[in-house]
Amino acid sequence: MDLLWQGIKEAIRLLLGGDPEVFAIVLLSLRVSLIATATSLILGVPTGMALALSRFGGRRFLISLVNVGMGIPPVVVGLMVAILLWRSGPLGFLGIMYSPLAIIIAQTLIALPIVTGLTLAAVQQLNPKVRLQILALGASRWQMLWILAREARLSILAAAMAGFGGVISEVGASMMVGGNILGQTRVLTTATVLETSKGNFDVALALSTILFALAYTITLALTVVQQREKAP
Amino acid sequence: MLSRVTGLCTLILGLLCFWAANGLTSTDQPVMNRIIILATTTSTQDSGLLDLLVPLFQIKTSYVVKTIAVGTGQALAMGRRGDADVLLVHAPEEEKTFMAAGHGIKRQPFMYNDFVLVGPTSDPAKMAKAKSAAEALRQIAASKTLFLSRGDNSGTHILEKQLWMRAGIQPAERWHQQSGQGMGQTLIIASEKSAYTLTDRATYLKLKRRIELTILLEGDPELLNTYSLLQVNPLKSSKINSAGAQAFVDFMLAPETLDLIRTFGLEQYGQPLFHLLKK
């Protein structure tokens, strides 16, 4: 218990004291996870809608892949991305292994199935008659898609929250493709692992507290938007 | 209808995304041939030695070092595949095999510390009385007290396997368990489980105040822990930064750096964490 208290005090000290190292780690975590979430939304929302609205052979198989992907362990994604990005791998010539970009790629792949799957479920849940009605009112195809996305926006915001929560808190992929390099790819979760193995439990706890506060703040902002949207 | 709060939140989220995307350009990589990938063991990072030396090297030479702290087994594998330029590892036998297979162009042992056998103060296996590491391990086996192994093919794990072999014992799973984690984590688990374990002295000293384990056996020449610098053979891949690896090795072996290594930890632990090999 003493340790817990010490950790919270250390967190406040690190944040208020403006420790530049911790500050850089916090900024990098936030930046990497926001870009990954945004990218997964840009790719995942249209994919989810397409899967929900279209009918083609192999569709169910694709959906089952998306659904299983929602629970894929980040460390597996990390390993696959690492195999591609290592110098000896097929994309090694890009030279992006152990860089923030490598973490963004891995995190995007982690969030993508979550966003796609939740969007798919949300759009399918809309009353099918709405779709006919929109078309009957003379909307074009793109207008219809836009209106459906607006109809499902509460769930899409939930998908954004789930995706962001998933990537800011994952450690396996960041460790593997980022390498936890100080000043380059050390993010909050990998720094927590390192400080724990160094025996600096108070610092590790402080980093966890900061991580939690950060995830909570972003989620709170999204929740406010989501819940206000509900009231007409 | 957007209320003021919603508007504000949307604005903040939008600005955040804008800032994050803006950062993309600033996370650009430095020029490729200025990057060195250093694959090393966890002990050099957990002890804080590299956090001291790597920044100095980067300032001096304007190279950017990507330090990947993994077990020695994985570090050597990275070298074999050409995924690293220079290795800082501690498993002499495996290193010699690595060199003999032509994976490296130069191997330079330069510093050492030692391994120690640690365990609960109560010492149920009466290991403290043992005269050698092999005898100590036989006592653990005879008393079937829990021994926690790294189990990750790290330098420490490789030595541990050699020690069991020399003691003539095939450890049984019931009392010989594997943590599968780094040295720091393994010490923490061993402390919680009142188990024995083999550790390098540097990591032990770093964690000493956090764990309830005592050094029970030390000083056996078998427990010497030698660290070497290995330069990966540039013929393995066109991407290997041979000049960078050479610059890093030169820096590590320069008299000023060796002085820093020799005194590292002296102030904090009352004894240095690493010693220099005599030339």
Image (spheres, helix red, strand yellow):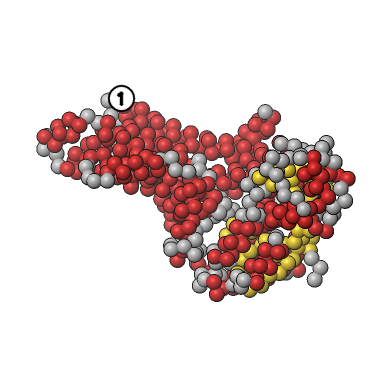
Identity of the residue drawn at 51% across and 54% down: A177
Given the image, on which type of amino acid does mark 1 rest? Ala
Packing grade of label 1 (10 A; few <14, some 14-19, many >=20) is few
- Determine if residue B10 is in view: no
Q: Chain of mark 1?
A: A
Identity of the residue drawn at 25% across and 31% down: A126
Identity of the residue drawn at 65% across and 30% down: A5
Q: Is residue A227 left or right of residue A209?
A: left
Identity of the residue drawn at 28% across and 29% down: B1
Horizontal and vertical percent for residue A181? 58, 54
Task: Tell me the SS state at disc 1.
Answer: loop
The image shows residue B86, relative to residue B203, as above or below, that is below
The front one of A195 and A25 is A195
- In terms of image quadrants, where is residue B110? bottom right
Task: Report the quarter where the C terminus of chain B lies.
Answer: bottom right
Q: Is residue B228 left or right of residue A136?
A: right
| Residue at mark 1 | A231
- Determine if residue B33 is in view: yes
User: What number of labels is visible?
Assistant: 1
- In terms of image quadrants, where is residue B139? top right
Q: Is residue A113 left or right of residue B111?
A: left
Horizontal and vertical percent for residue A7? 64, 35
Horizontal and vertical percent for residue B208? 76, 43
